[in-house]
Each structure stands twice: as structure tokens, then as C-alpha cells.
Amino acid sequence: MAKQEPSIDQWLKEAKQDPKAAQCGMYLTHNGVVRATPKKQVREGVEGLGEVVQVDFSYDEEGLQKAIEEALTWDGVYYVRVWLNEGVCNVGDSLMYVLIGADIRPRCIDALQKLVGHIKNNLVVEREIFAE
């Protein structure tokens, strides 16, 4: 793995010490992980691609900062923290951690889904490396 993973326990501890923590009634986390099944197989049903052994992963740092700032403007969202890996990562390695703190469950769920979707669709480049 290219970067050391953060501690979600530590992240939550820090989030609960944040000045806006009293506004948060829920925290949700997302942990995206390299899987052996190719993306095209999972999402589009394409067979015969082989097994993924690694992913070469990179992202737009400036775009990520803008996405975090924007997420903090969404209704009910008071805390956002994101970690993205980079470089060549093996199956089982984490690619992404996202922590969202919001006032109520529906807003927290929606914010997590919206932010992760934006990151995955617009800010990261993933090149799957297949077994020989």
C-alpha cells in the first residue's frame, strides 16, 4: 500500500471534539477497498476480464479540497474528512475513507452518498492491474 491508513477511531474522537460536534446527531464512514472483481464486471456484467491484483490509484487534490468545502455547505452537514490513497494498491488495501457528520440520518446518508459519488466519478483515476 502506498500510504498509511488513518484510524477511524481517532477520526471519530477528533470529530467529536470539533466546535460543530454538538450539531451532529450522526456520523457515517465509508471505506473503499481494492477488490479482485473488475469494475466492469460488477457494474456492467462484463465477464472474462480476469482477476484484479492491484489498482494504480491517483486523484485531483485541489478538486478534493473543493469537494470537501462544498459538502460543508450542504444542509445539515457539519463535519467532513476524507483520506485517499495513491500509487499501486493491492487487493484488500484501502483506497478511500470518508467521514461525514450531520444533524440527522437522512442528510448524513445523502451527503455521504453524494460526496463519495462525486469523488469516484470526477476526482479519482483507477487503473486495474490484472493477474497474468
Image (spheres, rainbow, N blue to C red):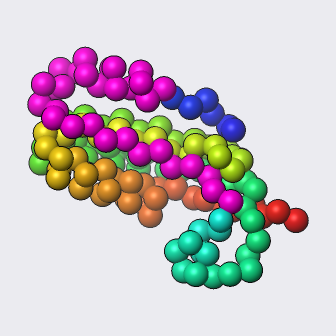
Magenta region, residue range: 7-36
Identity of the residue drawn at 65% across and 46% down: 92
Res 77 quadrant in image: top left
Can you say which quadrant of the picture contains the C terminus?
bottom right
Q: Is residue 28 visible?
A: yes
Up-down relation of residue 68 to residue 21 (above or below) = below
Q: Position of residue 75 (x, y in %)?
A: 12, 48
Q: Position of residue 58 (x, y in %)?
A: 59, 50
Horizontally, residue 11 falls left or right of residue 102, namely right
In the rendered image, residue 88, in percent from the top left (x then y), is placed at 71, 47
Quarter of the N terminus within the rendering:
top right
Residue 119 vs 26, above or below: the answer is below
Residue 116: quadrant of the picture? bottom left
Residue drawn at point x = 73 percent, y = 76 percent:
49
Does 126 sit above or below residue 26? below
State left or right for residue 70 relative to residue 91.
left
* Residue 14 in magenta stretch: yes
Q: Depth check: 57 or 113 in front?
A: 113
Q: Residue 39 vs residue 13: left or right?
A: right
Q: Quadrant of residue 103?
A: top left
Q: Who's the residue at 75% across and 65% down the image?
A: 51
Q: Which residue shows up at 32% across the image and 56% down it?
A: 113
Observer-nearest of 80 and 106: 106
Instruction: From the viewer's side, name the closer residue of 24 and 72.
Output: 24
- Residue 61 shows up from this direction: no
Q: Is residue 11 magenta?
A: yes
From the viewer's side, name the closer residue of 47 and 1: 47
